[in-house]
Amino acid sequence: MILKSRRARKWTIVVASVLVVVLGAAFTLFEVSKSRTFQFFGTLVNRVETDEKIVALTFDDGPDPAGTQAILDTLRRRQVPATFFLIGRDIAAHPDLARAIAAAGHEIGNHSFSHDRMIGVTPAWVADEVEATDALIRATGYPGEIHFRPPNGKKLFALPHYLASHDRTTITWDVEPDSDGTPDAASVEQAAVDQVRPGSIVLLHAMYAARGQTRQAIGPIVDRLKQRGYRFVTVSQLLAARR
């Protein structure tokens, strides 16, 4: 009986140790999957190191009729370039709006076709998501480099490996002033102005109907940052300025 008891304790310790290792690995992978500054393969950029007061304004999702034209009008009045990370299914639904973004001279990035989280997915699925959206972006007339931003910033193995093998850069961000649902315009404005530093990449969700407060904040954000000496550039221009 004593021998059996010792064996039972031994196996309990072994099983507990294995569980600790498995849970620890799972937690680590979860943290990596949402990291804005690290991925297992290829190049990821969330901001650039520079002494210049330059900042990249980026918009995720869409295009959507509720907010696209209003954003373009605000940027046009202030002569500010931006980078739009568009969803393939939304481009397919509203090709005229995507063409308007390209015609206005803004940069267009790839935000996947379905906006599903790209974790635990197959390489073939990743390739379909990226390449279908690339084709739709090219159909807008946009001629520049197409960077990629993962939906919800999530990535693990298949997506970074695909992007690295195709010499593509993963773009995240270091400033997200409207991350808490739909805060009021003044809060979005103040958070952006407080957090921006030279080389920042600002993420805004302003395209959809529920994001009217974010749309209202765009102009004041631009105006105040310009007053502080900042110049707005596209993501590609920001990458070119890296030290």
Image (cartoon, rainbow, N blue to C red):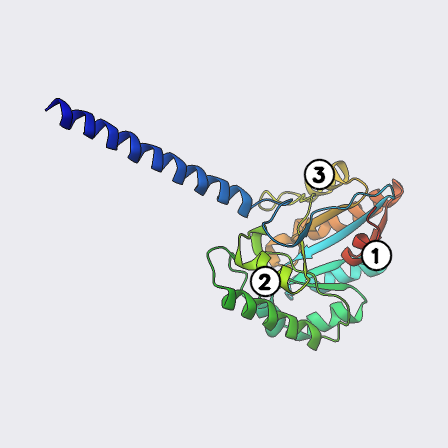
Q: Earlier in the sequence, mark 3 or mark 2?
A: 2
Residue 100 at x, y percent in the picture: 75, 71
Q: Is residue 14 left or right of residue 102?
A: left
From this viewpoint, is residue 111 visible? Answer: no
Circle 3 sits on which residue?
191
Q: Amino acid at mark 1?
A: Val
Closer to us: 14 or 217: 14
Residue type indicated by callout 3? Ala
Are the residues tagged 3 and 2 within 8 Å (C-beta)?
no
Q: Which image quadrant is residue 196 in?
A: top right
* Residue that carries the numbered disc 2 in the rendered image: 162
At a point 44% along the width and 42% down the height, the residue shown is 26
Above or below, 149 relative to 197: below
Secondary structure of the residue carrying numbered label 3: helix
Quadrant of the image containing the N terminus = top left
- Closer to the camera, 30 or 218? 30
Q: Residues within 10 Å of mark 2 (few under 14, many from 20)?
A: some
Residue 75 versus residue 41: which sits nearer the camera? 41
The local secondary structure at tag 2 comes to helix
Q: Assess disc 1: are there few (<14), some (14-19) or many (≥20) residues with their C-alpha within 10 Å of its C-alpha.
A: some
User: Which mark identifies residue 80?
Assistant: 1
Q: Nearer the viewer, mark 3 or mark 2?
A: 2
Mark 2 is on which residue type?
Tyr
